Each structure stands twice: as C-alpha cells, then as structure tokens.
Image (spheres, rainbow, N blue to C red):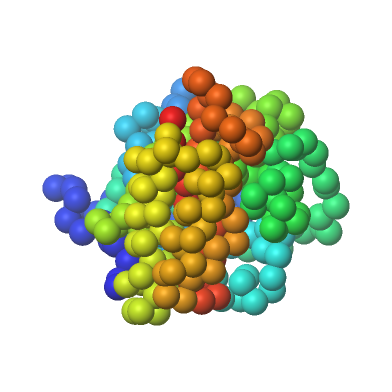
C-alpha cells in the first residue's frame, strides 16, 4: 500500500521552501528571523515524510511566524548498519510535500556538516532510556539527544514538534532540553494513523504487500487492551496482547510493556488515577514497528 501524501490540501499555489544544507547559512537565516521578532517553529525529521510529519509542520505553521523542517538521517542513532543503509531517502519527494505546506525553510545538512569531529558525548537520562527502546537499542537515545541538541543550537527554535508515536523519545528530548537549558518549548502531537489504524511511519513503505495487509492487527490488539484492561492484571494484559501479536502472520513481538505515562516505570499492578500507557515493538519480517496506546 502506498504511503499517504498531502494531496490538494491548500488552495494557494505550492509554497517555495528555501533549502539550505550549510550549518552556518542555516544559523544566519534563522538568526535574521529571530532578530525581526518572529517566533520559530521547528520539526526535525529523517525524511521519507508522511502525513504524520506534515501534521507537525502544519501545527508549527499555525503556532509560529516561521517554520523550519530538517531532514537528516542521523547515523549515530542506528544500532545496525543495515538499518541505516535501508532507511528510505527520497529528498525530491519530501521537498514536494513540504511545498504543499507553509514551511519556510528546509535544513538538509550532510553528515560532515553535522559531525565534523568524532562524537564522544554521553548523556545520562536515568530510567528514561533504560527500558523498552533503550533496553533493546543501546545507545539509540544518546544519538537522538546529540543530534537534536545540535539542531536546536543551529535553529534555536521557539517551539519544536514531535509525534507521540515515539513517546519515549519525546520524554528523552524533553530531558535533554532541560539538561542543556534550551529555551525551546517541546510540544508532543497525537499519533497520526492510516485509515486502518496503522501508525504512520517512514518504515511502513518497506513493508511488503502481505506485511502491510496484516500490520493493522497491531493497532487492533492495542485497542483491545484499551477497551478491556480493567478485566486483566497488568501481567495478564501484557501476555494477552503478546499472544495476539504472535498470531499475526509474519509478526514477532519484541516487547509489550505497560508503564507510567510520565516516568516510563513499568507497572506491576493497576494504581487508581495513575496514568498508564501500553508500549509495543513488533517485527513484521525484518521491519520493526513501534506503537503505543493510552489505557487510563
């Protein structure tokens, strides 16, 4: 199934997005906007844009006078070299999609631009990067934090927008922002889903037709959890969802975890008024998909 595109969303003509690949030029461009008193919204991405990304750009355009989007496939957040090599890259298509929004500037740096020197910085996020994605992808969030910190120092955004499909990443970025004392407001935005419920992801375009047909069952299992969690203990609910994943053709669950929304501490039992979210990672063949669902 093809990924979603914007289509004829706007009545105006396509917007001319300024594309910059040089760090200093990008820094100076944004500095001029800020000097003019304009608020700057920022949407960092790794490209292969879909409706989820574009919804972030649109919100930024509504809430800021200037919007910047970046596309940079960050090598230091990949655990496997083959995942980095296979990550979809389609800059011409991405630029065309951004031209259907009101995005003002696209920053597309090279790896040499972003990392002129070897990267050695190590963050400490406590429990936030020790569970779920952090447990299965060691070093991943350190790479994410490093690149977002560098992008923030270049763009100096008033607000930055991130999807909640990568909810653990959102919390890590908030903590990095606090540690680095960036003045940027971090805004989490709702998961955008395909009509059949599959969470939009750049990885979805790598699914075979058969895998794509079965992938929405991940969302159906999460919906079941939301609608029926009161009938289970926490461990039994996790086991039930894991069983539902195991019967999806070609699927292999990596983790199913119910955790506190704010701390990501896994829950052992239901506690009244404690916000709980189910987080999952499921392989469809060799394509790894993540998702989450608020339970209470």
Task: Answer with the quarter of the image where residue 67 lies.
Answer: top left
Who is closer to the viewer here, 135 or 248?
248
What's the residue at 36%, 70% (across, down)?
214
Residue 27 percent coordinates (x, y): 60, 42
In front of the other: 270 or 132: 270
Q: Can residue 152 be seen in this snapshot?
A: no
User: Is 116 situated above or below 180?
Assistant: below
Q: Quadrant of residue 194?
A: bottom left
Residue appearing at x 64%, y 52% in the figure: 133
> In this image, 161 relative to 57: left or right?
right
Residue farthest to the left, as pictured: 11
- Which quarter of the rendering shows the N terminus? bottom left
- Residue 259: x, y in percent? 58, 37
User: Residue at (61%, 35%) from the top-left corner?
Assistant: 267
Q: Does residue 253 appear in this view? A: yes
Figure check: 193 above or below 272: below
Quadrant holding the C terminus: top left
Q: Relative to the observer, which residue lies in front, 133 or 42?
A: 133
170 in relation to 143, above or below: above
Q: Residue at 69% x, 38% y: name it.
A: 128
In the rendered picture of this protein, how many numbered marks are placed on residues?
Answer: 0
Q: Is residue 93 above or below residue 55?
A: below
Left or right of 187? Residue 195 is left
Q: Position of 49 compared to 169: left or right?
A: left
| Residue 197 place in picture, x, y as percent | 31, 55
Expressed as whole percent of the image width and height from the top left, the position of residue 138 reads: 75, 56
């Amino acid at each position: 199934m093809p990924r979603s595109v914007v289509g004829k969303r706007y009545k105006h003509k396509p917007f001319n997005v300024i594309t910059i690949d040089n760090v200093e030029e990008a820094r100076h461009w944004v500095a001029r906007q800020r000097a003019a008193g304009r608020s700057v919204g920022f949407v960092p991405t790794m490209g292969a844009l879909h409706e989820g990304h574009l919804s972030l750009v649109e919100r930024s355009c509504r809430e800021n006078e200037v919007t910047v989007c970046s596309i940079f496939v960050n090598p230091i957040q990949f655990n496997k070299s083959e995942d980095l090599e296979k990550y979809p890259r389609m800059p011409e298509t991405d630029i065309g999609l951004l031209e259907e929004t009101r995005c003002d500037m696209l920053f597309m740096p090279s790896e040499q631009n972003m990392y002129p020197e070897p990267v050695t910085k190590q963050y400490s996020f406590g429990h936030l990067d020790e569970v779920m994605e952090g447990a299965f992808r060691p070093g991943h969030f350190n790479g994410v934090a490093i690149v977002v910190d560098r992008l923030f120092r270049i763009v100096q955004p008033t607000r930055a927008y991130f999807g909640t499909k990568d909810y653990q990443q959102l919390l890590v970025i908030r903590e990095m922002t606090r540690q680095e004392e960036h003045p940027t407001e971090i805004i989490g935005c709702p998961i955008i889903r395909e009509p059949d419920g599959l969470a939009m992801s750049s990885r979805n375009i790598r699914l075979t037709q058969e895998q794509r047909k079965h992938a929405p069952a991940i969302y159906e299992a999460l919906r079941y959890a939301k609608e029926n969690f009161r009938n289970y203990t926490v461990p039994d609910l996790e086991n039930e969802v894991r069983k539902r994943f195991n019967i999806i053709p070609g699927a292999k669950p990596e983790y199913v975890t119910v955790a506190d929304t704010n701390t990501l501490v896994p829950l052992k039992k239901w506690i009244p008024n404690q916000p709980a979210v189910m987080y999952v990672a499921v392989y469809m063949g060799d394509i790894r998909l993540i998702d989450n669902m608020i339970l209470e």
